[in-house]
Image (tube, rainbow, N blue to C red):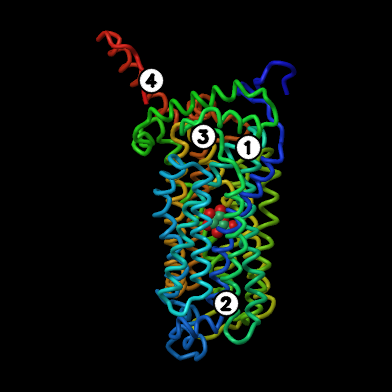
Amino acid sequence: MPAGGFSAVHKNGGTEFEAKITPIVVISCVMAATGGLMFGYDVGVSGGVTSMPDFLKKFFPVVYRKTQLKEESDSNYCKYDNQGLQLFTSSLYLAGLTATFFASYTTRKLGRKLTMLIAGVFFIIGTVLNTTAENLMMLIVGRISLGCGVGFANQAVPLFLSEIAPTRIRGGLNILFQLNVTIGILFANLVNYFTAKIEGGWGWRLSLGLAGIPAGLLTLGALMVVDTPNSLIERGRMEEGKAVLKKIRGTDNVEAEFLELVEASRVAREIKHPFRNLLKRRNRPQLIIAVALQIFQQFTGINAIMFYAPVLFNTLGFKSSASLYSAVITGAVNVASTVISIYSVDKVGRRMLLLEAGVQMFISQLMIAIVLGIKVNDHSDNLTKSFATLVVVMVCTFVSSFAWSWGPLGWLIPSETFPLETRSAGQSVTVCVNLLFTFVIAQAFLSMLCHLKFGIFLFFSSWVLIMSVFVLFLLPETKNVPIEEMTEQVWKRHWFWKRFVEEDEIEGQKRSVKKHSNGFEPSLEL
Ligand code: BGC
C-alpha cells in the first residue's frame, strides 16, 4: 500500500489503487450472496418438487399415473418423460435468456443497483405466483417471472461485484457468487427433503414459497446499497461517483482511480454499438472462449444432475425420500468443492483445475454408464445396495470436480478476459448463452434419458473429452494476469489466438497511416 500522497502502486506491471476492505464492500458481498442464492434456489427446487406425488397429481396427472402404475409399456427410463413437466423446469431459463438483453440496457442506463432491484421484484412476483398456483398456467407464468429475475440478477450482480471490489480480491469475490449459487441449491435440496414428508398437498407450496427468503433479501439489499462509482460516472453523476469511491475504498486518496474511471467511461461512451464492437476481429478470442465455456459448462451434464437428481435416483430404484437424501449429499459436495476452488484457483491456475476435473468427470460418468448399463434395464431395476452406493459416490465425484472447475471458471474466465469496453456486452452474451444451453439441457434431459438410457452418461462423457482437448490447446492461463494486460500478456503470446490480435493491430496501423497521408487526424480505433 502506498504511503503519503501516492494513490496507486504498480504491481506485476499492473496498477493497484489504495483500497481497504470496508463495511460497504462487505455488505456488497452479502448482496452478491443473495443474488446467487436466488439463482441456486431456483435451480435446486424444481427437481425435488417435480418428484413430489402431490405436485404431480395436481399439475401433471399423466406423469403421476405413470409413476404409480408400472405399466408394461413404460420403461424405467421414461417415467418422467413429459414435455409439460420439462417446460416447468426450463421455462425459467428461456425467460432468463430473453431478459438478459433488457438487463444489459438497464445496467447501462439505470445502473446496477436499480437492475438488481428489478430482479428482486421479479423474484417476489414469481414466488407469490408459484406458491399460490392453482393451475399449470399460473405455475409457468410464475417460473417465467423468476426467470426474468435470474436474467437481470446474473447480469447486474457480477458486474456490481467486480466494480465494487478492490482489485486484489476480485477473483475471490467472483467465485463467492458461484459459492452462493451452490448454497442456494443445497438450501433448496434440504427444504425439499423436509417438505417431501409433509402430507396434505402443501409440501410443494412450502418449497416454492421459501424462495421468498432469498428474493426478499435481494430486494432489501438492492434498496440499501449505493450504486457503483463506475455506473454513476457513466451516467454523468461525477461528484456522487467520486464520493462513493471514497466511501467504498475507505480513503480520500482516490484521484488516480477516479480519473481512470472517468477515462474508461469516456472510451465506453464512444462505443455506440457495444454488441457490434464485440464482433470485431480483435475481440474474437475472448468471444469464442466465453461462448465455448458456457456451452461446455452445460454439456458436462451438471444440470441433468442438479435439476433431476431426485428424479434420476427415483428412476434408479431409490425410494422418494432416499433419492432426495442423495440430492442433499450432492448439494453439500457441490458447496464444499466450490470452497476448494476459491483457495486453489489463484495458486494452481485455471487450466490445471479444468484439466484435472476433465479426467475425474470422464471416469465417473463412464462408471455410472457401465453400472446402469449392466444393472438397470427397461423393466427391472436390480441395483443392489452396493451398486446404488457406487452410483451415488460416482455422482459425488463428478459433482465435486465440476464444482472446482467448470462451475466457477465458466463465470470467472469470461469476466476477466474481456477488455473494459466490451466487458458489459460480453457479460450479456455469457449469461445468455449459459441460460440458452441450460434451457436445452433442462428441456431435453428427460427425453434423452428415455431414449439414450444409460448412454446419456456416455454422451456427456464424450463432451467432457472434447472440452478437455479445447482447454489443452486453446485456453490460455489467466492466473495472476492483471485484467487490463490480458492482450499483451495472454492473447499476443498464445500460439493460436495471437493471429487475431496481431492482424487486427496491423490492419489498424494501416488504416491510421492512410488517414495520416490523407491529412486526417489519427483517432482511437473502436
Ligand atoms: C451453472 C449452473 C449450475 C450450477 C451448479 C453454475 O455455474 O451455471 O447452471 O446449476 O453451477 O452448481
Give 522 or 357, whichever is nearer the viewer.
Answer: 522
Residue receiving disc 4: 524
Three-letter amino acid code at disc 2? Trp
Looking at the rendered structure, the secondary structure element under dot 4 is loop
Give yes or no for contact between labels 1 and 4 (Cβ–Cβ under 8 Å).
Answer: no
Mark 3 or 1 closer to N-term? 1
Q: Residues within 10 Å of mark 4 (few under 14, many from 20)?
A: few
Give 34 or 423, whichever is nearer the viewer.
Answer: 34
Total labels: the figure holds: 4
Residue lying at 56% horizontally and 80% vertically, measured from the top left: 52
**Quick check: which quadrant has ligand 1?**
bottom right
Q: Quadrant of the N terminus?
A: top right
Residue 237's tag is: none
Residue receiving disc 2: 204
In the rendered image, residue 391, in percent from the top left (x then y), is placed at: 63, 70
Residue 165's tag is: 1
Q: Residues within 10 Å of mark 3 (few under 14, many from 20)?
A: many
In the rendered image, residue 61, in percent from the top left (x then y), is placed at: 45, 85
- In this rendering, is residue 375 above or below 190? below
Is residue 290 visible to us here? no
Q: Residues within 10 Å of mark 2 (few under 14, many from 20)?
A: many
What is the spatial separation of the Cα atoms under label 1 and label 4, in whole angstroms? 29 Å
